[in-house]
Amino acid sequence: MKKKMFCILFGVAITGFWLSGCRGKSVPEKKGGENEVSTPSTVVLTAEAIQTAGIRIAEAEWMVAVEKSVVPGKIVFNPKYLAHVTARSAGRIERIFSYPGEKVGSGQILLTLYSPDFLALQAELLQSFQRALRFQTDPREKSMAQSLLDSVRKKLRLLGLREDEIDRIEQSGLMESLLPVRSPLAGSIIESSVTAGDFLELGAGLFKVADLSTVWAVLQLYERNLAQVRPGQDVSIRTAAIPEREFSGKIFQLGSVVEEHTRTVEGLVELANSDGKLRQGMYVEAAVRFPRSAKSLFVPDAALQDFESRMNRRVSICAKSRSGSRRRGGRRSRKAFGKASPS
């Protein structure tokens, strides 16, 4: 019995020494099978490799996306600087000095008119002036004579005569034979409907004069965007007549009526036009930009990827590339993309 117990203890001791000898020794790593997925590897590039590959590192940012809506419109004259010149007295046109397409200055004579009414008022002016001089010493008559003289001078001013011209008639005692018709503002003659020798009635149209240094673009804004459109918003305008140029302005007024058939509202934009390139009636396209209520994730345009022969119109954020993964059937490289739409 004692001999049998001794043999068991001896065997346990031998086993303990053998196990302690194996401590610290590495066990060979078992090779994985085809169905196991390996740990993704990390690729480290040198500065030279990054420069050669044209890789650029930039941070994605959360920003308010700006939506763009392209709407049609047309150019019209700025009504603040548009004038219709009409006949202030009946008469016959003696001479025309300016014609359509020509530039004129404010107060420049456009034509002269023979007017019997103008001659009659000049005669009345001279009589009133002489009477006012005669009654300078009579207080009661002086006041009445001066009132009559002021009334005649006012009528002549309404015909278009200037103060210095009226003073010259009074001082010289000589009447002018022809009534000058002047331009009320500096600009270009857009339209003329008269010729020399025409007899005109009171109020007949003569010229249309416009200052083309500024024009208006009348835009057709869609009803669905009205909640986001406000006066003061920036607008970029292009026209097929001047494809290489872009005009900038701001919406300063929105219409109060929705057009029944097109479901649009007029938006007015004032544009600088010092070189006169924009003309009345031109069709334009306007890009109206307005911010969205929520923010979107943005990256540089260079991050856009052409994937599967399709350009992804949305901004693509390229995450780090993973390689070395295994699936059934062999290797497969994977790229992760996060998407955010700026529009």
Image (cartoon, rainbow, N blue to C red):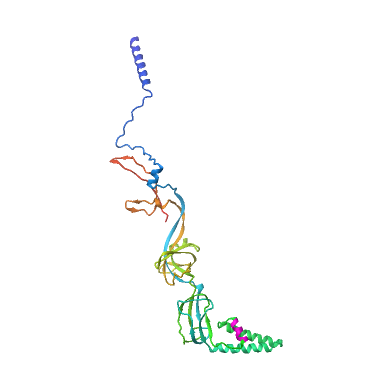
Decide whether the magenta segment is chiefly helix, strand or loop: helix
**Magenta-drawn stretch contains 196:** no
Q: Residue 124 at what x, y percent from top left?
A: 60, 89
Q: Residue 174 at what x, y percent from top left?
A: 59, 88
Give the quarter of the image for residue 128: bottom right
Q: Residue 194 at what x, y percent from top left?
A: 46, 83
Whether 283 is drawn above or below 15: the answer is: below
Is 260 or 119 nearer to us in this picture? 119
- The answer to whether residue 257 shows anywhere in this view is no
Residue appearing at x 66%, y 89% in the figure: 131
Q: Is residue 295 left or right of residue 162?
A: left
Q: In the image, which residues are magenta?
A: 164-171
Count the numbered circles shown: 0
Q: Residue 70 at what x, y percent from top left?
A: 41, 63
Residue appearing at x 47%, y 52% in the figure: 63
Is 225 or 183 nearer to us in this picture? 183
Whether 230 is drawn above or below 127: the answer is: above
Q: Quadrant of the N terminus?
A: top left
Q: Quadrant of the C terminus?
A: bottom left
**Magenta-drawn stretch contains 170:** yes
Name, please, the residue furthest toward the left. Answer: 329
- The answer to whether residue 164 shows anywhere in this view is yes
